[in-house]
Image (cartoon, grey):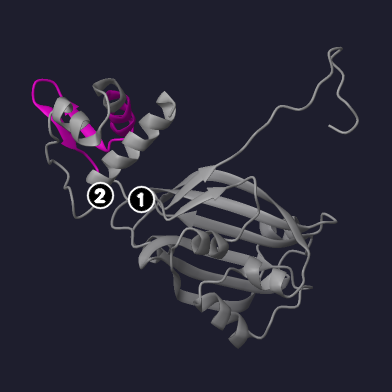
Amino acid sequence: MSTSSLVDVTETALRERLAPGRARPGDRLPPEQELAEALGVSRGTLRLALERLESNGEILRRQGSGTFVGRVAVPAAFSAGLEVLESYASLARRQGKTLTVRNLQVEQAATPGYVAEELGLRRGARAPLIQRTLLVDGIVAAHMRDVVHPDLKLPSVDELRAALLEGEMVLDVLVQRGDPIAFARTTVRPRLVEPRTRLGEALDAARVTAALELTELLHTGAGRPVQYSINVFSPGSVDLHVIRGFPSWEPDGSTPDNA
Protein backbone atom coordinates (compact mmCIF):
# COMPACT_ATOMS: atom_id res chain seq x y z
CA MET A 1 0.00 0.00 0.00
CA SER A 2 1.40 3.43 -0.94
CA THR A 3 2.16 6.05 1.70
CA SER A 4 -0.65 8.31 0.42
CA SER A 5 -3.26 5.54 0.53
CA LEU A 6 -2.10 4.48 4.01
CA VAL A 7 -2.57 8.06 5.20
CA ASP A 8 -6.06 8.02 3.65
CA VAL A 9 -6.92 4.83 5.53
CA THR A 10 -5.56 6.29 8.77
CA GLU A 11 -7.55 9.50 8.27
CA THR A 12 -10.73 7.46 7.79
CA ALA A 13 -10.00 5.39 10.91
CA LEU A 14 -9.47 8.55 12.94
CA ARG A 15 -12.75 10.00 11.70
CA GLU A 16 -14.53 6.86 12.87
CA ARG A 17 -13.08 7.45 16.33
CA LEU A 18 -14.32 11.05 16.21
CA ALA A 19 -17.82 10.13 15.00
CA PRO A 20 -20.89 11.37 16.94
CA GLY A 21 -21.62 9.07 19.85
CA ARG A 22 -17.96 8.08 20.18
CA ALA A 23 -16.37 11.49 20.77
CA ARG A 24 -17.36 14.98 21.82
CA PRO A 25 -15.71 18.33 21.09
CA GLY A 26 -13.04 18.91 23.75
CA ASP A 27 -12.28 15.23 24.36
CA ARG A 28 -8.57 14.51 24.55
CA LEU A 29 -7.06 12.00 22.12
CA PRO A 30 -4.59 9.36 23.35
CA PRO A 31 -0.86 10.14 22.97
CA GLU A 32 0.49 9.73 19.43
CA GLN A 33 2.49 6.59 20.20
CA GLU A 34 -0.54 4.86 21.75
CA LEU A 35 -2.81 5.99 18.91
CA ALA A 36 -0.34 4.83 16.25
CA GLU A 37 -0.07 1.39 17.85
CA ALA A 38 -3.86 1.11 18.12
CA LEU A 39 -4.24 1.90 14.40
CA GLY A 40 -1.26 -0.23 13.36
CA VAL A 41 0.60 2.60 11.61
CA SER A 42 3.83 4.51 12.09
CA ARG A 43 3.88 7.81 13.95
CA GLY A 44 4.87 9.53 10.72
CA THR A 45 1.74 8.25 8.94
CA LEU A 46 -0.39 9.17 11.94
CA ARG A 47 0.98 12.70 12.01
CA LEU A 48 0.18 13.25 8.32
CA ALA A 49 -3.41 12.10 8.92
CA LEU A 50 -3.68 14.32 12.02
CA GLU A 51 -2.45 17.29 10.01
CA ARG A 52 -5.32 16.82 7.57
CA LEU A 53 -7.86 16.72 10.40
CA GLU A 54 -6.28 19.75 12.03
CA SER A 55 -6.44 21.74 8.78
CA ASN A 56 -10.27 21.70 8.78
CA GLY A 57 -10.80 21.99 12.53
CA GLU A 58 -11.71 18.38 13.30
CA ILE A 59 -8.93 18.24 15.88
CA LEU A 60 -7.07 20.91 17.86
CA ARG A 61 -3.45 20.66 18.94
CA ARG A 62 -2.35 22.56 22.04
CA GLN A 63 1.36 22.84 22.70
CA GLY A 64 2.22 21.02 25.91
CA SER A 65 -1.35 19.82 26.47
CA GLY A 66 -2.05 17.31 23.72
CA THR A 67 -4.54 16.80 20.88
CA PHE A 68 -8.26 17.39 21.36
CA VAL A 69 -11.43 16.76 19.38
CA GLY A 70 -12.56 19.88 17.53
CA ARG A 71 -15.75 19.89 15.55
CA VAL A 72 -17.07 16.35 15.27
CA ALA A 73 -16.93 15.19 11.66
CA VAL A 74 -20.09 13.80 10.09
CA PRO A 75 -19.55 11.31 7.24
CA ALA A 76 -20.62 12.63 3.85
CA ALA A 77 -24.08 11.56 2.73
CA PHE A 78 -22.85 11.17 -0.85
CA SER A 79 -19.59 10.63 -2.62
CA ALA A 80 -20.34 12.02 -6.06
CA GLY A 81 -18.16 12.25 -9.15
CA LEU A 82 -19.05 15.22 -11.33
CA GLU A 83 -17.45 13.49 -14.30
CA VAL A 84 -20.50 11.16 -14.52
CA LEU A 85 -24.14 12.27 -14.73
CA GLU A 86 -25.81 10.03 -12.15
CA SER A 87 -28.83 10.80 -10.00
CA TYR A 88 -28.50 11.03 -6.22
CA ALA A 89 -31.03 8.20 -5.94
CA SER A 90 -28.69 5.93 -7.90
CA LEU A 91 -25.72 7.06 -5.80
CA ALA A 92 -27.67 6.33 -2.62
CA ARG A 93 -28.53 2.81 -3.74
CA ARG A 94 -24.90 2.06 -4.62
CA GLN A 95 -23.67 3.51 -1.33
CA GLY A 96 -26.27 1.72 0.80
CA LYS A 97 -28.12 4.85 1.92
CA THR A 98 -31.84 5.50 2.28
CA LEU A 99 -33.40 8.67 0.84
CA THR A 100 -36.54 10.29 2.19
CA VAL A 101 -38.17 13.63 1.44
CA ARG A 102 -40.03 16.25 3.44
CA ASN A 103 -41.77 19.51 2.56
CA LEU A 104 -42.36 18.37 -1.02
CA GLN A 105 -43.98 20.98 -3.27
CA VAL A 106 -44.96 20.40 -6.90
CA GLU A 107 -46.55 23.33 -8.74
CA GLN A 108 -46.71 25.35 -11.93
CA ALA A 109 -44.88 28.62 -11.29
CA ALA A 110 -43.63 31.67 -13.15
CA THR A 111 -40.02 31.16 -14.23
CA PRO A 112 -37.48 33.71 -12.90
CA GLY A 113 -35.60 35.59 -15.59
CA TYR A 114 -32.24 33.89 -15.09
CA VAL A 115 -33.84 30.43 -15.23
CA ALA A 116 -35.96 31.34 -18.26
CA GLU A 117 -32.83 32.48 -20.09
CA GLU A 118 -31.05 29.19 -19.36
CA LEU A 119 -34.03 27.11 -20.52
CA GLY A 120 -34.76 29.25 -23.58
CA LEU A 121 -38.15 30.45 -22.28
CA ARG A 122 -39.68 33.87 -22.16
CA ARG A 123 -39.43 35.59 -18.80
CA GLY A 124 -42.32 34.65 -16.52
CA ALA A 125 -43.33 31.59 -18.55
CA ARG A 126 -44.97 28.99 -16.33
CA ALA A 127 -43.11 25.72 -15.83
CA PRO A 128 -43.16 22.81 -13.36
CA LEU A 129 -41.36 23.75 -10.14
CA ILE A 130 -40.41 20.97 -7.70
CA GLN A 131 -38.99 21.77 -4.26
CA ARG A 132 -38.19 19.52 -1.32
CA THR A 133 -35.74 18.79 1.49
CA LEU A 134 -33.74 15.60 1.01
CA LEU A 135 -32.84 13.42 4.00
CA VAL A 136 -30.20 10.69 3.87
CA ASP A 137 -30.64 7.97 6.50
CA GLY A 138 -32.93 10.39 8.33
CA ILE A 139 -30.44 13.29 8.39
CA VAL A 140 -31.07 16.53 6.48
CA ALA A 141 -28.68 16.57 3.50
CA ALA A 142 -29.95 19.09 0.94
CA HIS A 143 -32.66 21.41 -0.26
CA MET A 144 -33.51 20.81 -3.92
CA ARG A 145 -35.25 23.11 -6.39
CA ASP A 146 -35.90 21.91 -9.95
CA VAL A 147 -37.50 23.77 -12.85
CA VAL A 148 -38.44 21.51 -15.77
CA HIS A 149 -38.95 22.78 -19.32
CA PRO A 150 -42.73 22.93 -19.90
CA ASP A 151 -42.43 21.06 -23.20
CA LEU A 152 -41.40 17.89 -21.37
CA LYS A 153 -44.26 15.56 -20.49
CA LEU A 154 -44.09 14.74 -16.80
CA PRO A 155 -46.36 12.15 -15.15
CA SER A 156 -49.39 13.33 -13.21
CA VAL A 157 -48.76 15.33 -10.05
CA ASP A 158 -49.78 12.36 -7.89
CA GLU A 159 -47.44 10.00 -9.75
CA LEU A 160 -44.59 12.50 -9.62
CA ARG A 161 -45.09 13.10 -5.89
CA ALA A 162 -45.15 9.35 -5.23
CA ALA A 163 -41.85 8.84 -7.08
CA LEU A 164 -40.13 11.74 -5.30
CA LEU A 165 -41.39 10.66 -1.88
CA GLU A 166 -39.75 7.28 -2.51
CA GLY A 167 -36.40 9.04 -2.95
CA GLU A 168 -36.31 9.25 -6.75
CA MET A 169 -34.90 12.36 -8.42
CA VAL A 170 -36.53 14.35 -11.23
CA LEU A 171 -33.68 13.09 -13.42
CA ASP A 172 -34.80 9.49 -12.73
CA VAL A 173 -38.38 10.35 -13.71
CA LEU A 174 -37.27 11.96 -16.98
CA VAL A 175 -35.01 9.06 -17.92
CA GLN A 176 -37.71 6.48 -17.08
CA ARG A 177 -40.08 8.31 -19.43
CA GLY A 178 -37.55 8.06 -22.26
CA ASP A 179 -36.30 11.65 -22.30
CA PRO A 180 -32.74 11.53 -23.72
CA ILE A 181 -30.82 13.37 -20.96
CA ALA A 182 -27.15 13.31 -21.97
CA PHE A 183 -25.11 15.76 -19.92
CA ALA A 184 -25.24 18.54 -17.34
CA ARG A 185 -23.34 21.78 -16.91
CA THR A 186 -22.64 22.15 -13.20
CA THR A 187 -21.48 25.16 -11.20
CA VAL A 188 -20.26 24.64 -7.64
CA ARG A 189 -20.02 27.55 -5.22
CA PRO A 190 -20.16 28.16 -1.45
CA ARG A 191 -23.29 29.70 0.01
CA LEU A 192 -24.18 31.06 3.43
CA VAL A 193 -27.40 29.74 4.94
CA GLU A 194 -29.02 31.89 7.60
CA PRO A 195 -31.46 30.66 10.25
CA ARG A 196 -35.05 31.90 10.17
CA THR A 197 -34.99 32.06 6.37
CA ARG A 198 -36.85 29.69 4.10
CA LEU A 199 -33.67 27.87 3.14
CA GLY A 200 -32.34 27.92 6.69
CA GLU A 201 -35.52 26.32 8.00
CA ALA A 202 -35.42 23.71 5.24
CA LEU A 203 -31.88 22.73 6.27
CA ASP A 204 -32.49 23.04 10.04
CA ALA A 205 -29.81 25.74 10.30
CA ALA A 206 -29.46 26.92 13.91
CA ARG A 207 -26.86 29.56 13.02
CA VAL A 208 -25.26 31.09 9.93
CA THR A 209 -23.75 28.10 8.14
CA ALA A 210 -21.57 27.65 5.07
CA ALA A 211 -23.19 25.26 2.60
CA LEU A 212 -22.35 24.00 -0.88
CA GLU A 213 -24.57 25.04 -3.79
CA LEU A 214 -24.65 23.01 -7.02
CA THR A 215 -26.42 24.65 -9.94
CA GLU A 216 -27.06 22.27 -12.83
CA LEU A 217 -28.47 22.70 -16.31
CA LEU A 218 -29.41 19.35 -17.86
CA HIS A 219 -29.29 18.92 -21.65
CA THR A 220 -30.36 16.39 -24.24
CA GLY A 221 -27.77 14.89 -26.57
CA ALA A 222 -28.65 17.58 -29.10
CA GLY A 223 -27.71 20.25 -26.55
CA ARG A 224 -31.27 21.34 -25.72
CA PRO A 225 -31.60 22.54 -22.07
CA VAL A 226 -34.48 20.75 -20.29
CA GLN A 227 -34.03 21.15 -16.52
CA TYR A 228 -32.53 23.79 -14.23
CA SER A 229 -31.67 22.69 -10.69
CA ILE A 230 -30.34 24.39 -7.58
CA ASN A 231 -29.24 21.95 -4.87
CA VAL A 232 -27.93 23.33 -1.57
CA PHE A 233 -26.11 20.73 0.53
CA SER A 234 -25.63 20.90 4.29
CA PRO A 235 -22.02 20.96 5.54
CA GLY A 236 -20.35 17.57 5.15
CA SER A 237 -23.26 16.00 3.29
CA VAL A 238 -21.54 15.60 -0.08
CA ASP A 239 -17.99 14.65 -1.05
CA LEU A 240 -17.40 15.77 -4.63
CA HIS A 241 -14.60 14.58 -6.86
CA VAL A 242 -13.72 15.39 -10.45
CA ILE A 243 -11.51 13.47 -12.85
CA ARG A 244 -9.50 15.69 -15.19
CA GLY A 245 -7.12 14.74 -17.96
CA PHE A 246 -4.63 16.41 -20.25
CA PRO A 247 -5.61 16.73 -23.91
CA SER A 248 -3.69 14.60 -26.34
CA TRP A 249 -0.84 16.38 -28.08
CA GLU A 250 1.69 15.78 -30.80
CA PRO A 251 5.46 16.43 -30.50
CA ASP A 252 5.13 19.43 -32.81
CA GLY A 253 2.53 20.95 -30.48
CA SER A 254 -0.48 20.19 -32.68
CA THR A 255 -3.60 18.48 -31.39
CA PRO A 256 -4.82 15.40 -33.26
CA ASP A 257 -8.24 15.53 -34.90
CA ASN A 258 -9.72 12.95 -32.56
CA ALA A 259 -8.56 14.72 -29.38
Residue to which mark 1 is pinned? 75
Disc 2: CA contacts within 10 A as few (<14), some (14-19) or many (>=20)? some
Distance Cα–Cα, label 1 vs label 2:
8 Å
| Whether label 1 touches label 2, CB < 8 Å | yes
- State which quadrant residue 106 falls in: bottom right
Q: Is residue 245 visible?
A: yes
Quick one: SS at disc 2?
loop
Residue to which mark 2 is pinned? 19
Q: Is residue 60 magenta?
A: yes
Q: Residue at x 85, y 56 (%)?
A: 222
Q: Is residue 223 left or right of residue 188?
A: right
Q: Residue at x 65, y 66 (%)?
A: 171
Give residue 114's position: percent from left, percent from top: 68, 56
Q: Which residues are magenta?
A: 47-72
Give residue 122's position: percent from left, percent from top: 78, 64
Q: Earlier in the sequence, mark 1 or mark 2?
A: 2
Quick one: SS at disc 1?
loop
Disc 1: CA contacts within 10 A as few (<14), some (14-19) or many (>=20)? some
Residue in front for this viewpoint, 28 or 223: 28
Residue in front for this viewpoint, 132 or 72: 72
